[in-house]
Image (cartoon, rainbow, N blue to C red):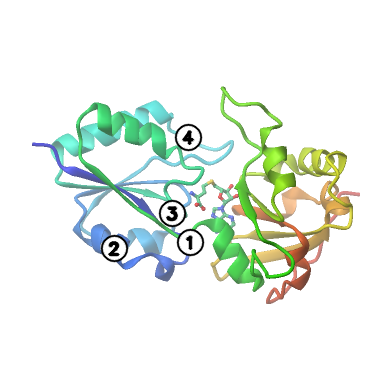
Amino acid sequence: MSGKVYLVGAGPGAADLLTLRAARLLSAADVVLHDALVQEDVLALAPQARKIAVGKRCGKHSTAQRFINKMLVAAAHTNQVVVRLKGGDPMLFGRAQEEIDALSAAHIEFEVVPGITAALAAGADLKVSLTQRGLARSVSFLTPRHGAEEQEAEWLRAALAADTAVFYMGAGQLEQIAQALLTGGKPAHTPVAIVENASLPHARQWQTTLANLARFNVDAWAGPAVIVLGEVVATAQAEEWAKLQHIS
Ligand code: SAH
């Protein structure tokens, strides 16, 4: 008999933004396979569990997805409660489908536990309603990164169609993002906020415009960050705006 695998959202970072269900599963887990972005104090909710880091951070140490799938299946064969803990929501930009496919193929029972995704934590930090009445009726979560099968420019369609766009994993591509949006017709004065480490005590926010985004110094930030673009950003009330550092 195999155990059960729970694909659990760890939320954006702050441990108390975890769902009660996630916390309950962590306290019952035999083993936790977690991403690099998952905070220590979230893992501390599973003191009894064996913890395996299978983190994937852009450019840093990574465990190949196929290997992670194999580890998940193997863990389910030798444990009752297996928690696969992913940052934010497990189903958004987290390669969840590959893991689901592997579990299904191995006839292993699984369940998904949603989490607060980074875009929503960023909106909360900025005190911005991503769908503010009168300004925005739609919001897109997107990433300029693409899989082998996808077209590079696919994201642009989504970014232009939505009133508010939140970019995940865009840090290394600010210039391309800004250039493509400007060419696509987004006004140069469109407000942009960058939120790093949303929900955490050391979170930082920068505000700029689309025209200046390309010149923003990416080296200034170290943690995970989302880019929020749209008129709603003009109403943002960050606790404290970090000083914009432009590349000279
Ligand atoms: N499943 C996650 C996203 C994983 S992709 C979720 O739902 O949030 C990883 C990207 O998420 C990072 O490159 C960054 O763009 C974003 N991200 C994750 N945590 C973040 C945080 N605390 N603050 C800002 N952005 C974050």
**Amino acid type, callout 4:** Ser
Q: Which residue is mark 3?
A: 38
Sequence-wise first label, 2 or 1: 1
Q: Which residue is mark 2?
A: 21
The x and y percentages for residue 52 are: 32, 44
| Secondary element at tag 2 | helix
Q: Which residue is mark 1?
A: 13
Give the alpha-carbon distance from disc 3 to disc 4, as whole Å. Answer: 14 Å
Label 4 environment density (alpha carbons within 10 Å; few <14, some 14–19, many ≥20): some
On screen, 174 above or below 10? above
Sequence-wise first label, 3 or 1: 1
User: Which of 138/183 is in front?
Assistant: 138
Give the alpha-carbon distance from disc 4 to disc 2, as whole Å. Answer: 28 Å
| Secondary element at tag 4 | loop
Image position of 65 (left or right of 7): right
Give the residue drawn at x 22%, y 28%.
106
Label 1 environment density (alpha carbons within 10 Å; few <14, some 14–19, many ≥20): many
**Amino acid type, callout 3:** Val
Say which quarter of the image contains residue 201: bottom right
Give the alpha-carbon distance from disc 3 to disc 1, as whole Å. Answer: 7 Å
Q: Which residue is mark 4?
A: 62
**Amino acid type, callout 1:** Gly
Q: Nearer the viewer, mark 4 or mark 1?
A: 1
